[in-house]
Amino acid sequence: MAIRQQQERGAPVLEVRDLTVEIRTKRGTITPVDRLSFTLRGGEVLGLVGESGSGKSVSMMALMGLLPAGAARVTSGTAFLGGTDLLSVSPKRLNSMRGGVVSMVFQDPMSALNPVMRVGDQVMEAVRVHHRGLGRKGLRARAVELLELVGITDAGERMNAYPHEFSGGMRQRVMIAMAAANEPAVIIADEPTTALDVTVQAQILELLQDMKERIGSAIILITHDLGVIAEIADRVMVMYAGGKVEEAAVQPIFDAPRHPYTASLLASMPKLSGAVTTMRTIPGAPPDLLALPQGCRFNPRCPLADGRTECHTRAPELVHLDGGQQSACHFPAEVEKAFSRSSDQIEEGGERA
Amino acid sequence: MALFIAGRTAQGALVLLAVSVVVFLLSFLSGDPAALMLPAEATPAQIAEFRQEMGFDQPVFVQYWDFLVGALTLDFGVSYFHGDDALGMVLERTIPTLQLTLAAMVVALLIAIPLATVAALRRGSVIDRLVGAVAMLGQSLPHFFVGIVLLIVFTVRLGWLPAIGSPTARGLVLPALTLGLYATAETMRLLRSNLLEVLHEDYVRTARAKGVSRAGVMVRHAMRNAVIPVITVLSLQVGTLLGGAVITETVFSYPGMGLLAVQSIANRDFLVIQAFVLIVAAIVVFLNVVLDIVYGLVDPRIRFEVRQS
């Protein structure tokens, strides 16, 4: 119950320090997550953005203890959730925390539910493993309640259906019901809307927010859709090549990014206002984790790094700027000028193309 | 569900009809039945008389019709060699053969399920490699060889079990092991690879994220999905097992219908063979229908497809 007490708005719920994950591949060992630190506060939605391979999902899997056994392992770091370090706790204890105090919603609801198990049984299972004493009747009642809560009509009837009888959006609702089943302190949502129809995406985001209000969980939302961030996140953490490059509240990130990568991401968003122009892309490709550039990992793609030895020799440390903004750039003050962006970006961010 | 069962049953009936044609034609493949059945010194006149008596001079369609009507009324004629009712002789031997086949299947599942599970969970371990080796041996060794080796070890050397098979607990051990080895190997390999695949599925990760224990994940999520293809293979193996029973029964002199079939072939007692083939076909078709229904019970998506069509 210690976790519950810390859940008041603003108090740190999850504190991750120096999380490092290594994966052995045939070509060598890579570090998809490199000394990642962040704090999640009670009741907030922390957006986690970055390109594919930036370490977003891997870091969250590491917290959940769900990295594929054998190949990937956590080599250092701590992650305190309610006084327990998720990274060093015994597998048995971690199992009792998973789905209890920290739960997860996955990207593809089409494959995330067991195809040969009734939807109701899967929801009941999520409750049962954490409430051993509850009888079948109690479990059923709770499952129906949860399904109703996530907006499934005729929940009592639909308990007996199988996942293939549900649409993608409905399945994601079921996933959210299972994630919320035990009112966890933290819900990690790994691109919960990516696999869904655009029309359904907004409903699912709304539902996530609604569940957050109801049960008071803090949410980590992984996405590469900045529009989603603008819509529901309170704070944003931008990852690049396994590390955090910028962190700030939503407004400052959209108004005045302090890292060239964040600025590039924002600039590559299609705009609804103004003339139709060619979509801007970030030059180059995400770095090969086996051959990271010297100095700053973003330097081959960065407009600020041209001819600056500092960018090519020394990896920038995370610096704290005004208003709690953090940036891992040697020249955070120059970002704004280099990208000379308009300030109405946040509205555009709200309306995804 | 009733529609599903009715559909599968109708399909089974059609298969049996096709088999009856093949079985009937079989008797013509080995030459003039009248000449074959009578002793070598029979005169052409005697052969012609016998042919007329047995109806072999009738057009093929008429003969087939007679055969079909006979089969449907469970009248396959009288064994030329023994003078007994052909169907009765086969049926009498059917139960022991089914007992042997069932015992072989139970042996296969009892050995295969736990070993495949351990092999999948401890992938690359000594146990996994041992399971792989056993599976390869089991699939490559012929029944008669395995049977003889088991006889030499457990009967001749150790004297633990009888040499002659019989439908009793002791008499079934060696024949069931012999017959079940192939099915064990096949089931083991298939289940292991299915489990490995299923353990990487998203829904297994979901189950772990919910906090389900290792055993719970294995039983409720992985196993139930991994056995679906195994059921298909098992239904195909029923035929293989009954075919294998012919050889196994011969090795152990087991009083089943396989041994009867081998003896009848040697005696050219083809009415008994017709009855045998049709009974075996009926059993295989029946078990396939049953396994199809089981399949539908385990995998709801199959039921769904039927409902839609």
Image (spheres, coloured by chain):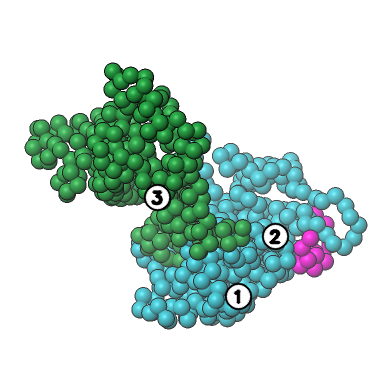
Residue A47 % position (x, y): 63, 65
The magenta region covers: A339-353
Which one is closest to the eye, mark 2 or mark 1?
Answer: 1
Q: Report the residue at 55% width, 64% height from top.
A: A163
Which of the labelled discs sits on residue A231, or is there none?
none
Could you tell me if residue A348 is visible in this image?
A: yes
How far apart in space, not on screen, are marks 2 and 3 (Cα)? Answer: 72 Å
Task: Name the one closer to the observer, B27 or B1.
Answer: B27
- Left or right, A239 with respect to A276, comes to left
> Tag 1 or tag 2, which sits nearer the N-term?
1
Which chain is the one coloured green? Answer: B
Residue wearing tag 1: A152
Q: The residue under label 1 is which amino acid type?
A: Ile
Q: Report the label total.
A: 3
Percent position (x, y) of residue B99?
Answer: 26, 48
Q: Establish whether labels 3 and 1 are both on one chain.
A: no
The quarter of the rendered structure image containing the N terminus of chain A is: bottom left
User: Which element type, helix, strand or loop, lies under badge 1?
Assistant: loop
Between the residue at mark 2 and the residue at mark 1, the CA separation in whole angstroms equals 26 Å
Q: Give the residue pinned by disc 2.
A: A225
Q: Could you tell me which residue is drawn at 33 percent across and 31 percent down?
A: B140
Q: Amino acid at mark 2?
A: Asp
Label 3 is placed on what type of residue? Thr
Q: Residues within 10 Å of mark 2 (few under 14, many from 20)?
A: many
Image mark 2: chain: A
Q: Quadrant of residue B35?
A: top left
- Chain A display color: cyan
Give the mark toward the camera: 2 or 3: 3
Which percent across, then down, holds residue B252?
20, 36
Secondary structure category for the residue under label 3: loop
Helix, strand or loop under label 2: loop
**Numbered mark located on residue B73 in the image:** 3
